[in-house]
Amino acid sequence: MMGPLSGIRIVEFEGLGPAPFAGMMLADMGAEVISITRKTTPEGKRFDNSISERGKKSIAINLKSPEGIETVLQLLEKSDALIEGFRPGVMERLGLGPDVCLARNPKLVFGRMTGWGQTGPLAHAAGHDINYISLSGALGAIGRTGEKPMPPLNLVGDFGGGGMFLAFGVVSALLEASRSGQGQVVDTSMVEGSAALMHMMYSFFNNGGWQDKRGVNMLDTGAHFYETYETADGEYMSVGSIEPQFYALLMEKAELDPAVFGNQMDMANWPKMEDALAEVFKTKTRAEWSEIFEGTDACVAPILSMTEAPKHPHNVARGSFIEVGGDIQPGPAPKFSRTQPQVKAPAARPGSDTAAVLQDILQLDAVKLAELEQAGALS
């Protein structure tokens, strides 16, 4: 057995960002993920070997063809779940809405990924990660005091609040379907997912422990002991010495003056302590600070680039990064003691598995495949 989801079949409708990431997570865990693309890659055209497509099978189906839609429905009859990231109503207009699909397979889990959700005043509006995390309160909380909000790449909306919640929702619904025998729709919204990621900040806020302002709180760079600092060689270190015993180690290892840094929770003096600590970190290189702090409980670590991270001894020891098809990329996470996930293959060329998948799952012979090709069902 390879991966805890081995034996689960999921049909993914090709898209961008969070839905393919959810498909990658499910494929990493051993699920058979069949990605439906609407066209193959012509010879000579650049093939984008996206990490999010690793471990999946790719089939090319013409979703504007009645025969193509029927072929998809037949696949769904023999699948456990589907995931899609279209705007609300697109699947319905294709003839692949939840009512139709669940009628063909009552146990099917229908996973949907959108920014705003399937309902509500903004459901049909365009948007991107930056817009979704604007409405959840996440973006407004990220940034330094007196500065504009800082988008955290597209990690919080697309992937943390989107793709991961879709994967979680699909697996939850699959577990429930295994008991009830009934499928259902999983309506995943990046607004709601990113809001859920803000649960700790809302807890602090409700209890009076968080100001509704940027850069003045303990975890948003307001505190000198939860910050990033430049080193003598222009690199950076991260400091997260929150607990008193960890802060004491920071003071010891960095040889900080108790007269300046002794009162850790003196919020009024946090800006002054931050300026002073910045000067301390500029006295040594990143390598020198790493040697001082590594392996201690001071919660201080070097800030690595994307090139450096896969080479760090800790990441190497755990196999946190892997090589797939000649490319270094993050490995499957989390790890399991028995059903350890493995990446089965790099991204397939669009449509490269069409014949094999339809022959294997639908038992179509060469004649039937030729008929579908002639009817325009295969793109």
Image (cartoon, rainbow, N blue to C red):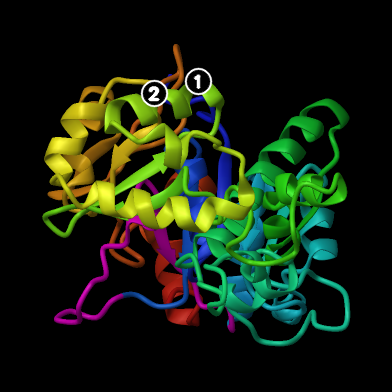
For the point 49% across and 44% down, which residue is it?
25
Q: Is residue 180 left or right of residue 158?
A: right
Does the stretch in magenta take in 48? yes
Q: Residue furthest top?
A: 338
Q: Are marks 1 and 2 in contact (CB under 8 Å)?
A: yes
Q: Quadrant of the N terminus?
A: top left
Q: Is residue 378 left or right of residue 22?
A: left
- Residue 318 appears at what percent x and percent y? 28, 24
- Residue 129 appears at what percent x and percent y? 58, 72
Q: Is residue 143 placed above or below 345 in the rendered structure? A: below
* Main SS, magenta residues: loop
Q: Which residues are magenta?
A: 41-64
Neighbor class of circle 2 (other Cα within 10 Å; few <14, some 14-19, many 20+) is some
Q: Which residue corresponds to mark 2? A: 249
For the point 84% across and 56% down, which residue is it?
103
Neighbor class of circle 1 (other Cα within 10 Å; few <14, some 14-19, many 20+) is few
For the point 34% across and 35% down, which residue is it?
256
Say the numbered circle drawn on residue 237: none
Q: Which residue corresponds to mark 1? A: 245
